[in-house]
Image (cartoon, helix red, strand yellow):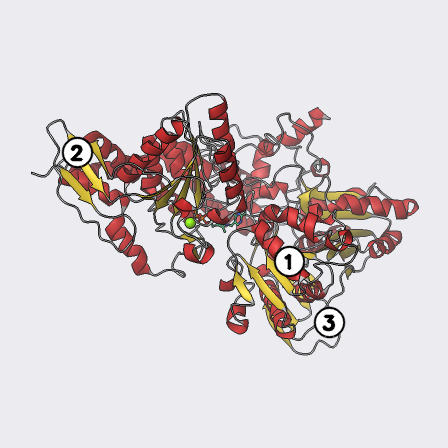
Amino acid sequence: MMLSKNLTQSLLRYTSNGAITKNASSRGFHTSKVLLAGGPSTPINYPSLEIPNAGETQKMNLFQAINNAMDISLRTDEKACVFGEDVGFGGVFRCSVDLRNKYGAKRVFNTPLCEQGIAGFAIGLAAQGATAIAEIQFADYIFPAFDQIVNEAAKYRYRSGGQFDCGSLTFRSPYGAVGHGGHYHSQSPESYFAQTPGLKVVMPATPIEAKGLLLASIRDKNPVVFFEPKLLYRSAVEDVPIGDYEIELGRARIVQEGSDLTLVGWGAQMKVLMQAAQMAKEKLGLSIELIDLRTILPWDVECVEKSVKKTGRLIISHEAPKTGGWAAEISSAIQERCFLHLESPIQRVCGYDTPFPLIFEKFYLPDHLKNFEAIKKSINY
Amino acid sequence: MNSSTYCKGTGHSSSKQDFLRGYASKSGDIQVKFNKFDTYLCDGPANQTTTNKDELMTFFTDMTKMRRIETVADQLYKKKLIRGFCHLYNGQEAVCTGMEAAITKEDHVITAYRDHTFMMARGATPKEILAELLMKSTGCSKGKGGSMHMFTRNFYGGNGIVGAQCPLGAGIAFTQKYNNTGNVCLTYYGDGAANQGQLFEAFNMAKLWDLPCIFICENNKFGMGTPQKRAAAGDDFYTRAHYIPGIKVDGMNVLAVKTAGKWAADWCRAGKGPLVMEMDTYRYVGHSMSDPGTSYRTREEVNNVRQIRDPIEYVRKLILDNKCATEDELTAIEDAARVEMDEAAEFAIASPFPEPGELYTNVYKELVPVRAVEMTDTLIVVVNQQGNKQQQQQIKDIILFGGMFIIFILLICLFGPLKNVQHHRSNITAAEQQQQQLR
Ligand SMILES: Cc1ncc(C[n+]2csc(CCOP(=O)(O)OP(=O)(O)O)c2C)c(N)n1
Ligand SMILES: [Mg+2]
C-alpha cells in the first residue's frame, strides 16, 4: 500500500482526536471530559463564572440556559416575543422548548422558511417597540438575512438621525463545528457581522454566561447578533443561577490568570484553549492567561491590552478562516497599543482559508495541538 | 375487453387507487388513465397515456434501485460511516423518474439536498454516489461534497441552502434560450422552500424573459416538521407564480408525471416560457437521518400512503395485471438491485479518502496559498494510554473500511507498547509541501 506517512499521520489525527464524551459537572467547575490523544491526561477544568448574590442554582446545559433566559425575558417583559423556523415546537436544538405552552402562540411562534423575511419582520417589530427575539436555525442560514441585518437593522438609528431604531432586537443563531456538520452546518460567521458598526455581536462559552449574556443582549438598546456554540448545547453543563441576572456586554472575562502568554478566544474555542493552556502547563511549565472575549463587537480591547502588557505574548484563536477573521483585528489593535511590550510576534491559530470542509474537519480546526505548537513557538521565539 | 387501465390516485393520500384491469393491445401498447390534472392558466395534457412493457420494466427497475440505494445509505449512516447531513427520497421516486423520462440527457436539472436519486436518474453510477456519501476520493465530488452535494453531467446539484437553487435554474434556462439549444431546465424545490423569496425573484425573471424553465415543487407535505399548510398562506403551489401557468400532478404516479413532464417540456421548447409543476408526493422517512419522522405525523398516515399510493407498487401492479412479467421476474429485479447496491457499498467502503491536499484544491481555480498552515509544520501525534484505548476501539470499527487502514493499524501496533506520552514530529504533510513550493 502506497500510503504516505503524511497521509497516515493525518488519518490518525482524523480518527483519534476529539471525541467529546458526556460531561460530568461539578460545582464551581465547568467540566467536560475530552478524550484527546495528546491532550492532558486530566479532564479539562474550565472554571465557572461566579455570579454575585446568585441565589438558587440548577444544573443546566447550554440550551437549557438559553431557554431559561428566554423564559425570564418572556415573563418579565410582556412585549417580548420569540419566533423562527420550528421555534414553536422547541426549535431544532430544543432552545425554545415549552415556551409556547407557557406564553402562548401569539408570543412564541413558527415562521415560514424565509430568513430574509424573518430578519426584516423582526426589525419592523422591534421598530414598534417590541422585544424581538428571532432565531435563525443555523448560522450558516443567516446569509439570506445578511442584507436585512447589515443594511437595515445596523443603520436604522444612524440614517434616521435617531428617530427610529430596532434596538430591542436580538438574533440568536447556533454556530460552529460539531464534528460532522459539513459545509452548511458548521460555519462561524462572526467577523462578517463584526465589521458592521451599529450591531453588537456576542458569543458565549458556558451555560452561566450564555444566560447572562443573552438576557443582556435582549435588553440592550442595540440590535445584537448572538451566536451560540451548538457543540456545547448538550455537552456543557453547569449549576446555573435560576434567577434573573445579566452579564455586561463589551466586557471580556479573564478565565485564568497567567504570566507567560495571553491566549484569547471565544465560544466553543475556549475549551480547546483551556486544554492547550493545561498542556502548556503540564509539559512546559507555562502560566497562560486565558481570556474569553465574549462580546466580539464592541470588543474589550483594554482587557486584552492590559494582559499583553503583562505577558508580552499573544495568541488569538478562532474556527473561522484566518484571513479577515476577527483575530486579525485584535492582532492589529494590540500591536498598535503594545508594540514595545511584545516579546514575540502575535499569532493567529485559526481555520484555514478554505470553505468549511466536510471530510477534513479535524485537519482544518485550530485544535489544542495547533495552539500548543503556537505557544511553544511564541515562547521559543 | 377494455383496453384501458384506470388509476385513481391523484390528490389525497386517503383516496384509494382503484385499478381496473388493463390489457396490452396487439402492438404491445398499454393504455393507462389517471386522474385529471389540476391546471392553472393552461389546459394541460389529457389524463391518459400509452405505455408498454419495456417502459414499465424500466420504471420498475429504476425506482427499485433508487429505493434500494437509499436503504443502503440508511445502513451506512447508522454504521456512522457518513458525516454531514443525509436526506433520503423514499416515497418520491416517481417524480424524478417520470420527469427524467420526459426529457433528454441534454436537458438540465438542479435540485436541493435530497439528491442521491437524481444522480441515478441522470445516469451516475451507484458506486460514485455511495463513494461520495462516504466522502471517498472515488465519489462524484471527490469526496468533498457528501450527501447534499452531488453533481454529474447536466446536473447542477446537490444544494444545501433551501431555495438557493431556484434562481440558478432560471440562469441555466436563460442560457438555453440565448444559445437556442432547445433544451430546458428542471428546477426542483420543496414545499418549504416555496416560501423563500428567492423563488419569487426567479419566477419573475423567468416569466419576464420567457425562459424554458420548469419549476417543480415537490410537495411532500412537510418542510422538516412543519406541515405545508402551516407555512404557506396559499398552498396550491402550482398557482403561486400568478403570471406563470401551472399544473398539479399525482407525484406518486410515474406515468402521470411523465405525461405532464413531456407536455411541459414541449411547452418550454415551443418558446412559451416557464411553467410551474406541483408534484403531489410524500416522504416516507424523516426529514434527515436525525429525524425519526414520527413526531409531526402519525404512523398510520405514513402507512396509508405506502399501502395506497406507493409509486413502485403502482408500477408492479400494472406489470402484473398486464402480464408484462411474473412475480418471480420482479423479485429477480429486486434481488439484482440489492446485489448491485451492496457491491457499490463495498466499493465505496474500500475506496480511499481524498488526500489531505484536497482540502486546498478547488477553492480557487489556481492553487493559492492557504494562510494559517504555517504553525502546523510540525504535526504532533501524541499517543498516551487513553488515546490508545480509544484508537483500539476505533480500529475495530475501522477494520471494516478495508485495506487502506492496514497501514494505520501497523502504525498503532508500532506505537502500542509505548505507554508514556510521546511526541512524534512528522514530516510536513503533502498539502504543506505544496504550500512551501508555492511560497
Ligand atoms: C436557508 C436555509 N434555511 C433553513 C435550512 C434548514 N432546512 C433544511 S431542509 C429544510 C426544510 C425544507 O423543506 P422542503 O423545502 O419542503 O424540502 P424537503 O426537505 O421536504 O424535501 C430546512 C428548514 C436550510 N438548509 N437553508
Ligand atoms: Mg417538503
Q: Quadrant of the C terminus of chain B?
A: top right
Residue at (59%, 49%) from the top-left corner? A116
**Tag on residue B331?**
none
Return the residue nearer the eye: B68 or A193: A193
Count numbered badges in the picture.
3
Residue identifier under label 3: A51
Judged left or right of residue B374, residue B44 is left
Q: Quadrant of the N terminus of chain B?
A: top left
Tag 3 and tag 1 share a subunit = yes
Instruction: Check whether the beta carbons of the residues at disc 2 and disc 3 lie within 8 A of each other.
Output: no
- Residue B31, how many percent across, how many down? 17, 35
Instruction: Check whether the beta carbons of the residues at disc 2 and disc 1 lie within 8 A of each other.
Output: no
Q: Chain of mark 3?
A: A
Residue identifier under label 2: B30
The residues tagged by marks 2 and 1 sit, at their Cα atoms, a distance apart of: 59 Å
Judged left or right of residue A242, residue B413 is left
- Residue B121, how many percent across, how many down? 36, 33
Residue at (44%, 50%) from the top-left corner? B288
Q: Quadrant of residue B37?
A: top left
Residue B141 shows up from this direction: yes
Residue identifier under label 1: A124
Decide: few, some or many residues near mark 3? Use Cα within 10 Å; few <14, some 14-19, many ≥20: some
Amino acid identity at mark 2: Ile
Return the residue nearer the eye: B159 or B8: B8
Among all residues in the image, which is located at the extreme left? B1
Tag 2 and tag 3 share a subunit = no
Instruction: Check whether the beta carbons of the residues at disc 3 and disc 1 lie within 8 A of each other.
Output: no
Decide: few, some or many residues near mark 2? Use Cα within 10 Å; few <14, some 14-19, many ≥20: many
